[in-house]
Amino acid sequence: MTTTEFFVAALGLIAGCAVVFRVFPTRQSASSRETASGSQSANSSNHEPPRAWHEVLNVSPIATLEEIKAAYKDMIAMYHPDRVANLGIELRVLAEQKAKEINRAYQYATRRR
């Protein structure tokens, strides 16, 4: 094989790969795809206003710090990643989103007290 033939073959291979990658987009891993869709759904496609911290923690808006802590412990126990580790990927992603929502609500509530 001459140098010219080698370069023509290499160029054809590169052009072929470029066409294939344009026609068939690369597959993302499940976690990166869900992370990307989760951030989009949380921001734009959900169309639901964010819930108030007391609704997330299922307490009264005038709850004491002890009541907030107890509600947080109960709620996070249900959605903790260790509890859902053996479930399907969709349920793990939902639990992760719910746990983040619970953590944000708890942080907001404890800062306000």
Image (tube, rainbow, N blue to C red):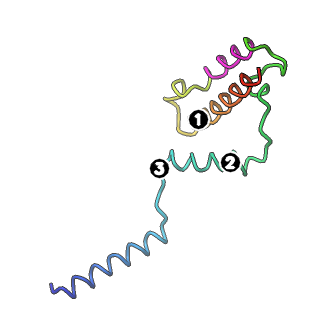
Q: Secondary structure at mark 1?
A: helix
Q: What span is in magenta?
A: 67-77
Query: Image quarter for residue 8?
Result: bottom left
Residue identifier under label 1: 91
Q: Position of residue 7 (x, y in %)?
A: 25, 83
Q: Residues within 10 Å of mark 1 (few under 14, many from 20)?
A: some
Mark 3–mark 2 distance (CA, rounded to whole Å): 18 Å
Name which residue lies at 54% across and 50% down.
33
Q: Position of residue 54 (x, y in %)?
A: 79, 25
Q: Main secondary structure of the magenta part?
A: helix
Q: Nearer the viewer, mark 1 or mark 3?
A: 3
Which of 23/52 is in front?
52
Question: CB under 8 Å between callouts 2 and 1?
Answer: no
Residue identifier under label 2: 41
Name which residue lies at 78% across and 13% down.
64
Question: CB under 8 Å between callouts 3 and 2?
Answer: no
